[in-house]
Image (tube, helix red, strand yellow):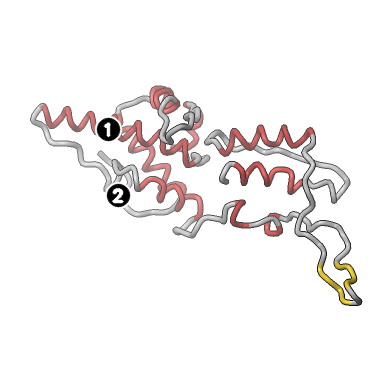
């Protein structure tokens, strides 16, 4: 069976590998999406929904799956491909010659990461690791210091306590779907007040969800 047999790191290479795995599984995209959508790969966590349209975009290199969605899909495809090879062996025929590592579930997260970063570059830091200032969140607007016996003492906290507002709930609903492995989303928050806390609005929810 033809396919990708090199260690490429582009999105095109990732898409080509996924296309070969899909073909090797013998499943249609519709069946693969249906079965993978019901396959949980994290104990105690509901599986994310995967659609035929998403798979089409992934194999066409128009988009990339989220980590959890990839794990669900790849596990289903690998299991199906191995069943076919096992049946061939039982019938006295040799298993198919597939690209190196194609049926190794542990290789796929690395290939996805390489497709995201290009040339194997390390992934961007998580929201939790980056910290608020790196995300463009402003420091609290309070006096820089107070006087203590004639000596200036730093008194400004990094962030002020955050007051949850109506738009936070809408943002968190968007974040929940994307972080859970669903399609990418774009939420636009706008206004004229630079101190409204737009950057901080979504950060706590990302941190809570381990992003």
Nearest the viewer among 140 and 114 is: 140
SS type, badge 1:
helix
Front-lying residue, 128 or 113? 128
Q: Residue at x 61, y 51 (%)?
A: 127
Mark number displayed over residue 72: none
Residue name at image x 15 percent, y 30 percent: 88
Foreground residue among 151 and 50: 151
Q: Position of residue 56 (x, y in %)?
A: 47, 32
Question: For residue 173, what is the image quadrant?
Answer: top right
Q: Which tag, 2 or 1, sits closer to the chain's start?
A: 2
Q: Position of residue 153 (x, y in %)?
A: 83, 71
Q: CA–CA distance between discs 2 and 1? A: 17 Å
Q: Which residue is mark 2?
A: 5
Q: Secondary structure at mark 2?
A: loop
* Number of residue marks: 2
In the image, taking residue 203 as reference, residue 159 lies left or right, namely right
Residue appearing at x 44%, y 58% in the figure: 120
Location of residue 134 in the rendering, given as x and y in whole percent from the top left corner: 68, 59
Q: Residue furthest left?
A: 92
Q: Circle 2: is it few (<14), some (14-19), or many (20+) Cα within 10 Å?
A: few
Nearer to us: label 2 or label 1? 1
Q: Quadrant for residue 36, please give it.
A: top left
- Residue farthest along the front direction in this orientation: 149
Position of residue 65 measured from the top left corner of the image (x, y, whole percent): 49, 39
> Residue tagged by mark 1?
81
Q: Is residue 6 above or below residue 79?
A: below
Q: Going 65% across and 41% down the picture, which residue do you hit?
A: 205
């Amino acid at each position: 069976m033809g396919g990708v047999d090199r260690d490429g790191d582009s999105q095109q290479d990732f898409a080509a590998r996924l296309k070969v795995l899909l073909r090797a599984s013998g499943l249609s995209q519709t069946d693969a999406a249906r079965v993978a959508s019901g396959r949980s790969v994290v104990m105690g966590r509901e599986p994310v929904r995967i659609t035929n349209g998403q798979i089409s975009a992934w194999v066409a290199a128009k988009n990339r799956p989220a980590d959890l969605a990839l794990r669900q899909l790849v596990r289903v495809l690998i299991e199906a491909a191995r069943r076919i090879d096992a049946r061939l062996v039982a019938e006295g025929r040799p298993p198919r010659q597939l690209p190196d590592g194609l049926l190794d579930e542990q290789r796929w997260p690395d290939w996805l990461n390489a497709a995201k970063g290009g040339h194997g570059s390390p992934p961007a830091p998580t929201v939790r690791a980056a910290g608020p200032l790196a995300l463009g969140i402003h420091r609290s607007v309070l006096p820089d210091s107070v006087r203590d016996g004639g000596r200036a003492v730093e008194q400004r906290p990094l962030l002020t306590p955050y007051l949850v507002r109506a738009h936070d709930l809408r943002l968190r609903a968007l974040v929940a779907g994307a972080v859970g492995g669903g399609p990418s989303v774009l939420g636009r928050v706008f206004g004229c007040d630079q101190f409204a806390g737009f950057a901080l609005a979504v950060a706590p929810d990302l941190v809570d969800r381990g992003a």
